[in-house]
Image (tube, rainbow, N blue to C red):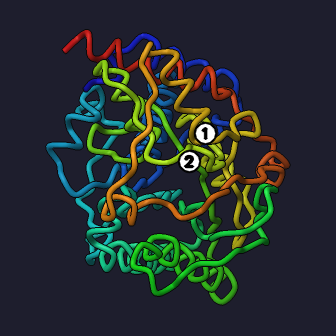
Amino acid sequence: MNLYRSNTYMKDLDDVIHAFGWLKNFEGKSVFVTGATGLICSGIVDLLLRYSELHNNSILVYGAGRNREKWEMRFSGYADSGILKFVPYNAGQQNQLDFHADYIIHGAGNAYPKLIQKHPIDTMTANFSGMLELLEHASGHPAVKTVFISSSEVYGKKSSGEPFREEEHGYIDILNPRASYGVGKMAAETLCASYASERNIQVSIVRPGHIYGPTAGREDNRVSSMFAYDVLEGKDIVLKSDGSQIRSYCYVLDCATAVLKVLLEGKSGDAYNISNPQSILSIREIAELFAEWGKSRLRFEIPEGVEKAAFNPMQNSSLNSEKLQSLGWEGVFDARRGTETTVKVLEECHALL
């Protein structure tokens, strides 16, 4: 699916670029992005490439991935542009990083619940070893600034209904293999803080909430991604719970600008929640929005044991974003606009297939 053929998606990119003049700070710079074809990082790459295209090809993006064919399909509009270069990369292995980039964004690793449940070892080790390799690379290039994309799952469970602040943490069952994702992210965060302290590496951490948008692939089995594709395909939206779990939802391009803002201005060794305060909703509420835009029906089913084991165990994973907002960031897409845009972009792209 070629998102660049969607007029809505391209307009959204242009609107975001117009709204955030501070993106000019990336002009003349190079940015290395791991996990470049993923939900979050492909949105970041799209934003940087579109900015570069509109401003004299002023930004060079190194997009890392395991599958070149998939990478070329995702970035087909820019694969031969000269402002985007492919970097073969696997977060669970040693990689050949024989180039210099001014900025590094690390977003590679398992994120789909089914993959986390099926491959907890790879999930956990790729987070830590992948970050270790990039921090060692940054050690040889002192001017480099790095951001690690962590997760709200580092917070674990808590009993209160208040959104998590960065200094808070709840309970995590460390003997549950499903915890490999959250605990792997936690270990990598501590590694970042250790490199910032001992070696003065400039590295910040972001903790996104539940990100959604048209950059998600059809294989993505996170619920908001599944809702969008179910609507596209004319299917009912099926909830496997009562939908009361509270989440911080954030449209992918808002998440992209948040990551880039922290990359520029975040304090080294510190963490920042990514959450749009206009989009703290229950799973049922966001399902109802997707159903509304797609004119689909919402129904409920009891999940099977294996399926249920892959679920995020947190009843409330809402995030307080005041720290991020103090840097001058704000979201452009509230939940209504974000869900409507997601459905519209997918419909436009599907119509052109």
Q: CA distance from mark 2 to mark 1?
A: 6 Å
Mark 2, other Cα within 10 Å: few <14 / some 14–19 / many ≥20: many
**Mark 2, residue position:** 210
Secondary structure type for disc 1: strand
Q: Residue furthest bottom?
A: 198
Relative horizontal placement of residue 55, taking residue 34 as reference (left or right): right
Which residue is nearer to you in this view: 232 or 30?
Answer: 232
Which percent across, then down, holds residue 243?
56, 43
Q: Please, is residue 257 above or below residue 264 in the view?
A: above
Question: Could you tell me the amino acid type at mark 2?
Answer: His
**Mark 1, residue position:** 250
Quadrant location of the N terminus in the rendered image: top left
Relative horizontal placement of residue 183, taking residue 200 as reference (left or right): left
Question: Could you tell me the amino acid type at mark 1?
Answer: Cys
Which residue is nearer to you in this view: 56 or 240?
Answer: 240
Which percent across, then down, holds residue 114?
31, 59
Q: Residue furthest left?
A: 69
Secondary structure type for disc 2: strand
Residue 314 seen in this snapshot: yes
Quadrant location of the C terminus in the rendered image: top left
Q: Verify CB contact (< 8 Å) between mark 2 and mark 1.
A: yes
